[in-house]
């Protein structure tokens, strides 16, 4: 059995354990904050004061937009435990990314104004993870993805694929923010500013094991109360046995074992 992925192609099971985690939203920074939130979840604020992010070099930190600081607040707090051992593969996943920066640039183009190279460089989807790589001089594998309503599940698939290829651990960072006003009509779930990070590895004896599979039939689709990324985090922190999700391209079943 290959670590991380088991089963035939039609019923592949993604199996993993969570070695460490962190999360960040307005008023929710510590693990105790988040565990209390998981028992009585609410939608975090859509805006917040930027995290201090003292771990990052000041020159790079100043360049980051708010969403970048929020994403990296979780990533730095969940860094590998061994001193200097930062070079684990990383998967950064955000359904929307920084749409505010995109709208600003499109507005400038419409007005025939020149684009800022710095603004453009930080607008691409892998920019936030890349700034972290530059700060840590980390030349390891970095992936950045967006897959609509399947974003979190696709990120787990990518992470488990890296485990199956021999990585001992993978850092998975999920983050998002409300979309810019011109795109608000297309939102299909509540939105807030948040991030979380898991360090995942192959399942180990004595620890909870999580699996993610394709479900046989369509999952119920109740009106969402949280962004899907936060619903997945709540599932893990609350210790629920299962969570179903109907994405754009698949229906997913999350399960906790042990």
Image (cartoon, rainbow, N blue to C red):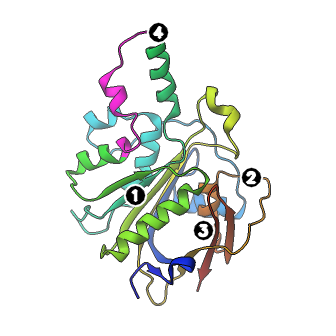
Please identify the quadrant where the C terminus is shown: bottom right
Q: CA distance from mark 3 to mark 4?
A: 47 Å
Nearest to the observer: residue 184 or residue 85: 184
N-terminal label among 4 and 1: 1
Q: Upstream in the sequence, badge 3 or badge 1?
A: 1
- Mark count: 4
Which residue: 55% across, 37% down?
A: 48
Q: Which residue is mark 2?
A: 225
- Residue 44: give x, y in percent of width and height: 64, 46
Q: Secondary structure at mark 2?
A: loop
Label 1 environment density (alpha carbons within 10 Å; few <14, some 14–19, many ≥20): many
Instruction: Residue 85: name its quadrant.
Output: bottom left
Residue 155: in sight, yes or no? Answer: yes
User: Is residue 191 found left or right of 144 in the rendered image?
Assistant: right
Residue picked out by circle 4: 111
Q: Which stretch appears magenta? A: 112-128
Q: Quadrant of residue 59?
A: top left
């Amino acid at each position: 059995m290959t670590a991380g992925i088991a089963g035939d192609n039609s019923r592949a099971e993604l199996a993993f354990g969570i070695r460490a985690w962190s999360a960040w939203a307005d008023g929710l920074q510590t693990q105790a904050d988040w565990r209390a939130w998981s028992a009585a979840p609410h939608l975090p604020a859509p805006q917040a004061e930027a995290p201090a992010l003292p771990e990052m070099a000041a020159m790079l930190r100043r360049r980051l937009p708010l969403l970048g600081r929020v994403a990296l607040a979780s990533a730095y707090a969940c860094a590998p435990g061994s001193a200097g051992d930062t070079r684990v593969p990383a998967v950064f996943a955000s359904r929307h990314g920084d749409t505010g920066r995109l709208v600003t640039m499109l507005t400038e183009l419409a007005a025939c104004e020149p684009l800022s190279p710095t603004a453009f460089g930080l607008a691409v989807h892998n920019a936030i993870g890349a700034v972290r790589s530059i700060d840590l001089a980390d030349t390891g594998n970095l992936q950045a993805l967006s897959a609509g309503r399947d974003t979190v599940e696709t990120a787990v698939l990518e992470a488990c694929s890296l485990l199956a290829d021999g990585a001992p651990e993978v850092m998975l960072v999920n983050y998002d923010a409300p979309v810019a006003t011109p795109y608000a009509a297309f939102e299909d779930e509540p939105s807030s500013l948040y991030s979380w990070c898991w360090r995942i590895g192959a399942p180990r004896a004595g620890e909870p094991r999580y699996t993610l599979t394709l479900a046989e039939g369509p999952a119920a689709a109740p009106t969402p109360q949280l962004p899907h990324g936060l619903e997945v985090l709540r599932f893990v922190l609350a210790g629920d046995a299962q969570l179903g999700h109907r994405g754009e391209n698949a229906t997913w079943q999350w399960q906790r074992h042990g």
